[in-house]
Image (cartoon, helix red, strand yellow):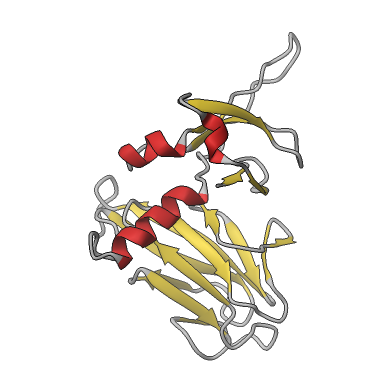
Amino acid sequence: MIVVCPACQARFQYDDSRFGGTRMKRFKCPKCSHVFEVFNPVLAAADPMETLSRPLPPEPGPDAPTPPAPASPALTTARRDREAMLVAAGLQEPGMPQGLRFSLAFLSGPQASTVQVLDRPVITIGREDGDVVTRDPETSRRHAQLEIHREGSVWLTDLNSTNGTLVGGEKITGPLQIQSHQEFTCGNSTFMLLIRDTDEFPLN
């Protein structure tokens, strides 16, 4: 299985058979030293709403400032692959999550200061082709892809673009889960993902 650090989004391989019968294991990220817990994927598969990994709160010292709110829980790719398997087997229909509205805000680039609603589960971002058109010469024709899953998670994948897709200033090398208000860059175009709960904040 692939474990994703919830702090820096680093990905590393782990043999899930080493869980044995335990419910979770504690990990220390080899890149940023963040400590978090990961649920046994075998047990999580029995409950698809179970989050596979969650960060641990830091241990404050006597003079430590109030820690920031914890990052959103990370998921291993096990859950993502399970959903894709269910869709492929015809056991789950692909589609948009109920009660959520997804959109992309252009923060920079030729389309800056515009917002585009994402109305389908798979969105392609490209220079002139795709669902989100950048008109940015530094963006590849088919640059990146967003996948919106039924439980509300959003995954970003680079489509072997020339200049790569950057999150936090680093090129991504595989599917990466991104959160609401998180930014990513394709060429000279920077986007912010926006997720709105339409039950809590109804659309006018």
Q: Quadrant of residue 126?
A: bottom right
Q: Quadrant of residue 90?
A: bottom left
Residue 96 seen: no
Between residues 28 and 167, which one lies in front from this camera angle? 28
Q: Is residue 99 left or right of residue 192?
A: left
Q: Is residue 93 above or below residue 109?
A: above
Q: Is residue 30 above or below residue 153?
A: above
Rendered position, 88 above or below 34: below
The image position of residue 75, as x and y in percent, is 50, 45
> Residue 134: where, in percent of width, then height?
56, 82
- Locate the C terminus by quadrant: bottom left
Residue 42 appears in the figure = yes
129 or 48: nearer the eye?
48
Residue at 51%, 36% in the rendered image: 53
Residue at horizontal 58%, vertical 26%? 56
Q: Position of residue 154 (x, y in %)?
A: 45, 58
Q: Which corner quadrant of the image does residue 50 belong to?
A: top left
The vertical placement of 44 against 111, above or below, is above
What percent of the width, then of the height, locates residue 51? 42, 38
Residue nearer the viewer, 17 or 60: 17
